[in-house]
């Protein structure tokens, strides 16, 4: 019960459906205030209005107060453990210190712009600021919906960021890396390079997810080593990846019916820190530059794009929910712009049948002229 005595007067002070109710008790005693609170709660449960409310209307509810409910009732049910930790960190380390005391219904676009300027001045990267703004925007939009706040949520414009740099290995580096890897780690590296699977997906891969007849791997799990459970992949949906001959042969040699495909020496699955150390050991033996397991995923996608695989196919193999994420590999794909410019040159013009490039015909003609001379 929330009966409070303020300056010799008893008040009822409680929260219901994200709104705070602070009402003077008609009977100026603790017992009377508790009884009055029970009456008010019953009225609210029946959908009846409580006339005398002070402080804590939905618009006045602070950002910090609402985020506590939002995290427990939205983030936890709808996000995986890693995403929960990330959002909890963003709220506690940056958003609550800046917006915490503001009434959530009174946060304006100007306040958001002030936050952006504040974060950039502290040296926070533009990409990190955008990640924080995404959390802020979702939280505020949910508040307007749950608290039935009148008006439109503030517009949150993301910062412009330079395109992300994609680090990937060359074919020679792939060969060098594999030549210094051994046993199950070598198989994990090979599978990462030829399937683009994430580290957690590799660690959580089960023998039951391999279709030997169709030569495909079904990615349906990712191993969460903090909770020691198998989760769905990052995209929350299964995907099917064909195995090439090398991956098929490597895995078929020790084919089993059940269990983890890539166990550690103790026959238990690798945790993330342990498998990171194993990759670093291989990299050091090979004398190679610094890279991570995710670099192998970038390598898979980049090599596909370089060889002309359509980006929507790369998207399906990687399990990206949006083609926008896959577009980071577009810069290494054969350029249609170059083909268009080459059409201006007589040496690059296409023949009338639109099949054999004119440059081949031009070269043949030049060779014939040379012979005739």
Image (cartoon, rainbow, N blue to C red):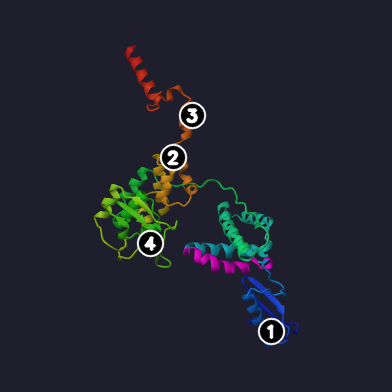
Quadrant for the C terminus, please: top left
Q: CB of mark 3 within 8 Å of CB of mark 2?
A: no
Q: Residue at x 35, y 46 (%)?
A: 174
Q: Tell me the residue that label 2 is attached to.
A: 333
Q: Tell me the residue that label 1 is attached to.
A: 33
Q: CB of mark 3 within 8 Å of CB of mark 4?
A: no
Mark 3 or mark 2: which comes first in sequence? 2
Front-most of residues 157 and 218: 218
Q: Tell me the residue that label 4 is attached to.
A: 274
**What SS does tag 3 mark?**
helix
| C-alpha span from label 4 to label 1 | 59 Å
Mark nearest the camera among 4 and 1 is 1
| C-alpha span from label 3 to label 4 | 50 Å
**What SS does tag 4 mark?**
helix
Question: Label 4: how many residues lie within 10 Å, few (<14), some (14-19) or many (20+)?
Answer: few
Mark 3 or mark 4: which comes first in sequence? 4
Q: Tell me the residue that label 3 is attached to.
A: 341
Q: Residue at x 63, y 79 (%)?
A: 42
**What SS does tag 1 mark?**
helix
| C-alpha span from label 3 to label 1 | 82 Å
Position of residue 241 measured from the top left corner of the image (x, y, whole percent): 35, 51
Range covered by the magenta-colored residues = 59-81
The answer to which quarter of the image holds residue 307 is top left
Mark nearest the camera among 3 and 1 is 1
Q: Is residue 342 above or below residue 276?
A: above
């Amino acid at each position: 019960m929330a009966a409070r005595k303020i300056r010799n007067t008893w008040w009822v002070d409680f929260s219901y459906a994200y709104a705070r109710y602070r009402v003077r008790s008609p009977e100026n005693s603790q017992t009377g205030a508790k009884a009055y609170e029970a009456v008010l709660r019953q009225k609210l449960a029946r959908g009846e209005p409580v006339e005398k409310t002070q402080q804590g209307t939905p618009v006045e509810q602070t950002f910090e107060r609402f985020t506590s409910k939002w995290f427990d009732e939205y983030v936890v049910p709808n996000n995986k453990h890693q995403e929960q930790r990330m959002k909890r960190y963003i709220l506690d380390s940056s958003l609550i210190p800046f917006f915490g005391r503001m009434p959530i219904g009174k946060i304006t676009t100007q306040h958001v712009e002030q936050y952006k300027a504040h974060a950039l001045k502290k040296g926070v990267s533009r990409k990190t600021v955008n990640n924080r703004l995404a959390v802020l925007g979702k939280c505020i939009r949910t508040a307007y919906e749950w608290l039935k706040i009148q008006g439109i949520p503030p517009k949150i414009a993301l910062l412009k960021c330079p395109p992300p740099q994609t680090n990937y290995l060359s074919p020679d580096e792939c060969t060098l890396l594999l030549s210094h890897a051994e046993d199950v780690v070598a198989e994990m590296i090979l599978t990462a390079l030829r399937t683009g699977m994430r580290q957690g997906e590799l660690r959580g891969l089960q023998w039951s997810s391999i279709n030997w007849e169709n030569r495909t791997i079904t990615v349906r799990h990712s191993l969460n080593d903090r909770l020691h459970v198998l989760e769905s992949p990052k995209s929350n949906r299964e995907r099917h990846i064909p195995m090439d001959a090398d991956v098929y042969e490597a895995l078929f040699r020790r084919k089993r019916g059940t269990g983890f495909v890539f166990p550690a020496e103790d026959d238990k699955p690798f945790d993330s820190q342990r498998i990171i150390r194993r990759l670093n050991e291989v990299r050091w033996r090979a004398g190679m530059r610094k890279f991570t397991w995710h670099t192998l995923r970038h390598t898979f996608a980049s090599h596909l794009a370089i060889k002309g695989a359509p980006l929507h196919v790369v998207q399906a193999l990687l399990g990206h929910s949006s083609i926008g994420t896959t577009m980071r590999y577009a810069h290494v794909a054969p350029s249609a712009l170059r083909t268009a410019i080459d059409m201006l040159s007589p040496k690059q013009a296409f023949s009338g049948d639109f099949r054999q490039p004119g440059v081949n015909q031009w070269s043949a003609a030049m060779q014939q002229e040379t012979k005739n001379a």
